Amino acid sequence: ATTEIYTLSLHDALPICVMRVLALVAIGALASCVASGDRISYVEYEGYSGADLAEAITHGPIPVRVFGAPSSGVTSEAAAVQIASAMAGANFGPVTEYVAYTTAPKAGYTMVVRFGDGAPSDRLCGEAVAASAGTDYGTAFCKDGQALSYLDGNVGTSSIYTPAFRVAMASAANELLPIENPEFVGCDNNRLC
């Protein structure tokens, strides 16, 4: 009997190594989401189109307006800064930047986040929104006072400075701003046309 010896060149071994690293990163990311307790319970895309996102980013960063906070010791302004940072670049498609809301946006696009009990997610785009402290939240991507897409969820933590909070807010941005509206079924059925 003969014994065959196989050798792998670096060229052959590198893809195996890269795939293992990517698999470990994906498992770690999934484990952190599960461990953090964040969850999105409902998403709606009433008037959203990928064209809205494209239009919004041509006018600069999307303002993030926050009502309430995950805990009573956190201001809405501090939460807005952390949320804008967490959402930056989180969605697929064009790189999207965010900034804490200070004045009405030029193009009318805003991301609104409400914590605790308060206004339903589809009604977050008005001037004043009822909110409180709590880890439940609603988020809406708005244009001129109308919700284009919105969701409800739970951040899984009361601290705005944790990786779990960042993951929850990045997930919200990713869900609210897909490349195209996942509910669009085509103009033949007259849905969203």
Image (cartoon, helix red, strand yellow):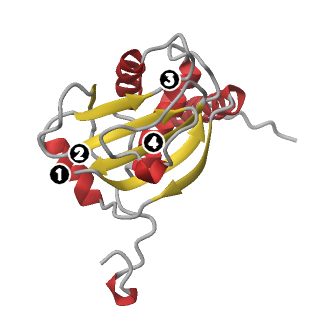
At 64% from the left edge and 35% from the top edge, which residue is drawn?
30
Residue 61, can we see it? yes
Mark in the foreground, 1 or 2: 2
Mark in the foreground, 1 or 4: 4
Would you place residue 70 above or below residue 146 in this image? Answer: above
Query: Which residue position holds label 4?
Result: 139
Dot 4: element? strand
At 58% from the left edge and 36% from the top edge, which residue is drawn?
117
Callout 4: 10 Å neighbours few (<14), some, many (20+)? many
Give the amino acid type for the residue marked by disc 3 in the picture.
Ala
Position of residue 58 measured from the top left corner of the image (x, y, whole percent): 13, 44
- Give the mark, 3 or 1, whose residue is nearer the N terminus: 1
Quadrant containing the N terminus in the rendered view:
top right
Position of residue 136 measured from the top left corner of the image (x, y, whole percent): 60, 35
2 left or right of 32 in image: right
Give the amino acid type for the residue marked by disc 4 in the picture.
Thr
Identify the mark at residue 69; answer none if there is no mark.
3
Position of residue 77 measured from the top left corner of the image (x, y, whole percent): 36, 18
Quadrant containing the C terminus in the rendered view:
bottom left
Residue 9, can we see it? no
Query: Which residue position holds label 1?
Result: 55
Hey, which residue is sitting farthest right in the picture? 1
Mark 1 vs 2: CB contact within 8 A: yes
- Give the mark, 4 or 3, whose residue is nearer the N terminus: 3
Callout 3: 10 Å neighbours few (<14), some, many (20+)? many
21 left or right of 186 in image: right
Query: Which residue position holds label 2?
Result: 109
- Give the mark, 4 or 2, whose residue is nearer the N terminus: 2
Dot 2: element? strand
